Image (cartoon, helix red, strand yellow):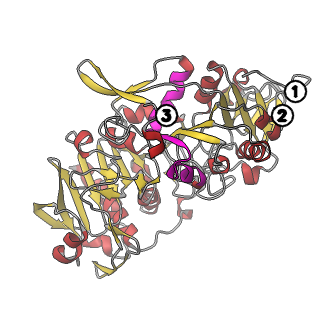
Amino acid sequence: MADVTKSGGTKIISAEEAAALIQDGVTICAPIMGLAGWPEEIARAIAKRYEETKHPKDLTLVCGSAMGNHKDKGPHVIGIEGLVTRFIGAHTHGSPNIGALIQNNKMLAYCFPQGVVVHMYREIAAKRFGVMTKIGLGTFVDPRIEGGKMNELTRNAPDLNEVVTFNGEEYLWYKPFPIHVGLIRGTKADERGNISMEKEGAFLEALPVAQAAKNSGGIVIAQVEYVTKAGTLHPKSIQVPGVMVDHIVVAKNPQEFHMQSEGVYYHPAFSGDVVMPLGALPELPFDERLFILRRAAMELEADSVVNLGIGIPDRMATLTGHEGVSHMMTLTTEAGAVGGVPAGWPNFGMTYNPETFIMHPNMFDWYDGGGIDQTFLGMGEIDSSGNVNVSKFGGRPIGCGGFINITTTAKRVAFCGTFTTGGLKTTAENGKLKILQEGSRKKFLNTVEQITFSGKYAANGRTILYITERAVFQLIDGKMTLIEIAPGIDLEKDILPQMEFKPEISPNLRPMPEHLFREEWGRLKGIIEAKKQK
């Protein structure tokens, strides 16, 4: 696409002018996690232009991570039939319109692991052959299973990955594609187009997206809050060089359309501008989620590198803050923060008091190579082989996010979730769990709807736990094995009838610790220190 600038050579244009540069049939790509990195004003201008002119049409949208605020912002605003007709990415759940188009077969949709997508930008930029990795083998992204195709419309569409053999071992080869328009975001731009990110809570993948677009012969448009004179940005603060940026859009309403996360326009503790006292962290309700968190936290080890997923696990950082043990391990997020206390939804991807930031693809270099000692992730459906589904329910596309990357390579994996879902209510008295109302839907099924974690491919002798409020299972020799039951819970009444399959029962079956179910806790530091001394 041609480099079009306004008269006088300035790179500054309006959101409406930016939308007019996007041609029919092109591939657009934006860094994103929730609303972090997302150029909302540009996206709204694209949607408005389409509604008025029916152009641009037939776009391919590429996004590497969770996208949107689950209601009215993010890629949701361009989720209009005819505007976007193909999606390639890792997660769709945060953008209802995109999800509906996929579910109703109005859009081609490929879902690939988050790390694969953000690594692909570098491969496109360097004009290499794509991404070859073991990430995804045995899961729904394996072309022998579903090939990452998220609906019937896509079933007969071309495969975007294939199984290859190298040195006698199987890999998945994810094929590259051109990016015609890179839509990135920053805090400041100088007059030459250099982009800084002082107020962002993550660098994400703005640089490789810009490089991929430019080396595909495309254009890069950056949405920023401020423009400053050329030469006034410190060279080390520049995340994307101006030579890679064609156009700059200054947000007119940044508090609404330039949000740091789904939850806030700007929190200085997320960008490292203040150090927030950990006593200011939110309280955790005394309920089944807290019981799960406490039991999962008992698996934490000193000096470990930890990843926390969304859902119940994203509260783990809050628990470690309350327990005064956050300093004993290094907590990380896929978005790129290292250290500090990762925030839960609606600020997932942000971190209170981060020690440092690295870029999104670099974090997945670390993750894919085994840099995570422990990970705690959610679970939607589980079967007798230990397979886990978090990516598709009742035909509704959710996506895998970084789940496949992380569960494939982390040294220890703990899946965390309630035993049933749909109205589950519990309480605890005198250290014993009591089910007040059982959930209406079972989660331990004969067959999961989609394989996001493959027990067969991914176990490899690692410790794989499944932690619920009433029971703990471990994947042992490929079989789901019950190893702990909560005090107050009856195996025949509260566990086996709520499962479609009968698990193996450990000969060393033991009770979950009674202290997990008491109002006051404060035991985590002692538990971690005791393990360190062994």
Question: Do callouts 2 and 1 mark residues in contact (Cβ within 8 Å)?
Answer: yes
Viewer-closest of 369 and 108: 108
Q: Residue at x 43, y 61 (%)?
A: 319
Label 2 or label 1, whichever comes before in sequence order: 1
Residue 250: percent from the left, percent from the top? 80, 40
Helix, strand or loop under label 3: helix
Residue 15: percent from the left, percent from the top? 80, 40
260 horizontally vs 515: left or right = right
- In the figure, residue 207 lies in which quadrant? top right
Q: Amino acid at mark 2?
A: Ile
Q: Is residue 75 a member of the stretch shown in magenta?
A: no
Give the numbered dot on residue 333. Answer: none
- In the figure, residue 288 lies in which quadrant? bottom left
Q: Residue furthest right?
A: 8
Say few, some or many: other residues with alpha carbon within 10 Å of mark 2 (under 14 / 14 to 19 / 20 or more): some
Q: Which residue is mark 3?
A: 117
Give the magenta range. 97-124
Helix, strand or loop under label 1: loop
Residue 225: percent from the left, percent from the top? 77, 42
Q: Residue at x 35, y 50 (%)?
A: 450
Q: Which residue is mark 1?
A: 6
Q: Residue at x 27, y 60 (%)?
A: 445
Question: Do callouts 1 and 3 mark residues in contact (Cβ within 8 Å)?
Answer: no
Say few, some or many: other residues with alpha carbon within 10 Å of mark 3 (under 14 / 14 to 19 / 20 or more): many
Q: Amino acid at mark 3?
A: Val
Helix, strand or loop under label 2: strand
